[in-house]
Amino acid sequence: MARMTTTGEHYVKAMGATRAYLDAVGSGQWHLATPCTEWDVKQVANHIIGENLWAAELFPGKTIAEVGNRLDGDLAGDNPAAAYAGSVAAATKAVTAPGAMQATCHLSFGDYSGSDYAAQLLLDTLIHGWDIARASGQNTRLDPDLVAACLPIAKELTTQFRGAGVFGEDLPVAADADAQTRLLAMLGRKP
């Protein structure tokens, strides 16, 4: 019988895919607009660097208060791709540690299992990777396994958090739209 892939393993895979996008961003592309309309490419990179660094702290059991404000501000620096790579290493170590999926993670909006937290990070990482790829003119075809893993997560999280302004409006799609198109539209992005 085949073993199921954990949300943590999917998150690690999504971080790798997003790293490839960041590594391909040209030096003059960091301030291009993205589908995540509040942020340019560097700001999206800074956000997901921060998410990864938070994961490295919260999976082992730290609280928001214990981490404090040291992950505020510009984490991307002069080399966002390198900063992202460092954050991936830190997050991967935390999320693949024994018991990480069963750990209690103390998030700003409540306590969640490591598996649930990894699911949130997986979705965020995959979609922001797409934002970066789209903005910088790269191939935007996402890994179909990651898209499939994200669809139920997106459905749950958009239902739970759309009212708080975390996600864009659910955009209409054709009845025969592929999984990636449906995922992106659910998160307010036009494929």
Image (tube, rainbow, N blue to C red):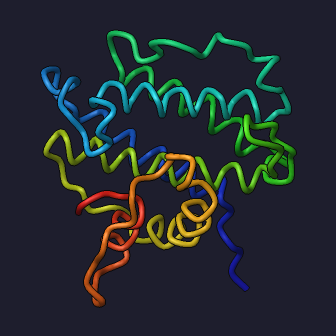
Closer to us: 188 or 49? 188
Q: On screen, 24 above or below 182?
A: above
Question: What residue appears at the point 61 percent right and 67 percent down from the top-left corner?
Answer: 156
- Judge left or right: residue 67 versus residue 170: right
> Whole-percent x and y of residue 142?
34, 61
Q: Position of residue 74 (x, y in %)?
A: 44, 13
Residue drawn 57% across the image and 58% down it: 10
- At horizontal 44% and vertical 67% (from top left) the residue drawn is 147
Image quadrant in which the N terminus is located: bottom right
Quadrant housing residue 135: top left
Q: What residue occupies the far bottom of the structure in this picture?
A: 176
Tell me where residue 182 appears, x and y as whole percent. 36, 73
In the depicted view, which residue is nearer to us: 107 or 144? Answer: 107
Could you say which is closer to the camera, residue 122 or residue 166?
Answer: 166
Q: Residue at x 60, y 60 (%)?
A: 157
Q: Is residue 72 above or below residue 91?
A: above
Q: Position of residue 51 (x, y in %)?
A: 57, 33
Closer to us: 63 or 59: 63
For residue 69, which quarter of the picture?
Answer: top right
- Side of 126 relative to 5 (left or right): left
Q: Residue furthest front?
A: 163
Total tally of numbered discs in the picture = 0
Q: Quadrant of the C terminus?
A: bottom left
